[in-house]
Amino acid sequence: MTVVNSSTSSAGRRPRGTDRRSRAGIAFVAGYVILLITFGVLPTGYAVYFAFTNAGGTFSGFSNFVTTAQDFRFMDAVGHVAVYLLFWLVSLVVFVVGLSLLLHRLSSGVASKSLRFLYYIPGALAGAASVLVWLFMLDPSVSPVSSLLGTLGFHTFGEVIAPGNLALLFTIIAFWTGAGGWIVVMYGALNNIPKDVMEAAHIDGANAWQTAWRVQIPMLRKWIVYMVILAFAAGAQLFVEPQLLSLASVGVAGRDYSLNQLTYDFAFQMNNINGAAAVSVELLVVSVSVAGIFVARSGFFDAD
């Protein structure tokens, strides 16, 4: 009986190291949860409250959504953001995956390391600083590539930033700033592909293109989905680029090019906080819906 009681008590007693690790894990998770609630959940709830109430705090249903949707600038902003997202997401998937595969082919040389570093450098610039660099680069009067701009038919800054060119310009700026980090992520994902899978493809006679298309890209599917989800959410919130360009071009780009600019205008120019909150909630719903579709259709959380 004594032996049984001793073994039972020792089995029920948790090691001290386990308790310490559990407390450390809870502490790390608690920090994230506190920040998430403080800067994510609470502001979202606050925005939802404003979106469904009027200036007096009375419930108003969907009136704020109707008011903002009927604004003459709303559909134009939706169209601008939609075109930008199309350019941005397509270029991101094609060029990030393509450059990652190319770097992976060069993995044994110094060139791969140097290129990865060079691709990552633009990401060190904040969004506003990056836009200012590009404003300098796109002005033919001061740009170091003015001859190239002239060859393309752009002789003045106004010609470069014509409304029809803005979606492409914002895509170039966003790609230059954000693609480097994703290239590093995709390169790491390629390194995690089992070597025996790659060797089997070579034994079967697959060339570089066949290996990339039939083996590597399918195994990058979840990483690509993850990139598209985050890039869509960030792109839908387009603000810094058109806002700075609007200031630099004295209104050529417009203060209402994107939905986030329109939200800013509602809140701080028209003193319509409730309308601004309604647009922000719409952006949230669209981003969450798109993320849900991608996750559901791609089997994002399925075990490999």
Image: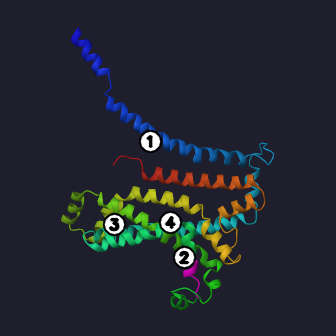
- Checking the image for residue 89, the label placed there is 4
Magenta stretch bounds: 134-140
Q: Is residue 136 magenta?
A: yes
Q: Alpha-carbon distance for marks 1 and 3?
A: 40 Å
Name which of mark 1 and mark 4 comes first in the sequence. Answer: 1
Name which of mark 1 and mark 3 comes first in the sequence. Answer: 1
- Name the residue rendered at 38%, 64% in the picture: 184
How dense is the environment of label 3, judged by Cα within 10 Å: few (below 14), some, or many (20 and up)?
few
Q: Amino acid at mark 2?
A: Val
What percent of the width, then of the height, locates residue 139? Answer: 59, 84
| Residue, far top | 1
Q: Amino acid at mark 4?
A: Leu
Q: Which residue is mark 2?
A: 133
Q: Alpha-carbon distance for marks 3 and 4?
A: 19 Å
Say if residue 232 shows up in the picture.
yes
Q: Amino acid at mark 1?
A: Phe
What percent of the width, then of the height, locates residue 118? Answer: 39, 72
Q: Secondary structure at mark 1?
A: helix
Name which of mark 3 and mark 4 comes first in the sequence. Answer: 4
Name which of mark 4 and mark 2 comes first in the sequence. Answer: 4
Judged left or right of residue 171, residue 102 is: left
How dense is the environment of label 4, judged by Cα within 10 Å: few (below 14), some, or many (20 and up)?
some
- Name the residue rendered at 70%, 45% in the picture: 49
Q: Nearer the viewer, residue 24 or 199?
A: 24
Nearer the viewer's eye, disc 1 or disc 3?
1
- Checking the image for residue 221, the label placed there is none
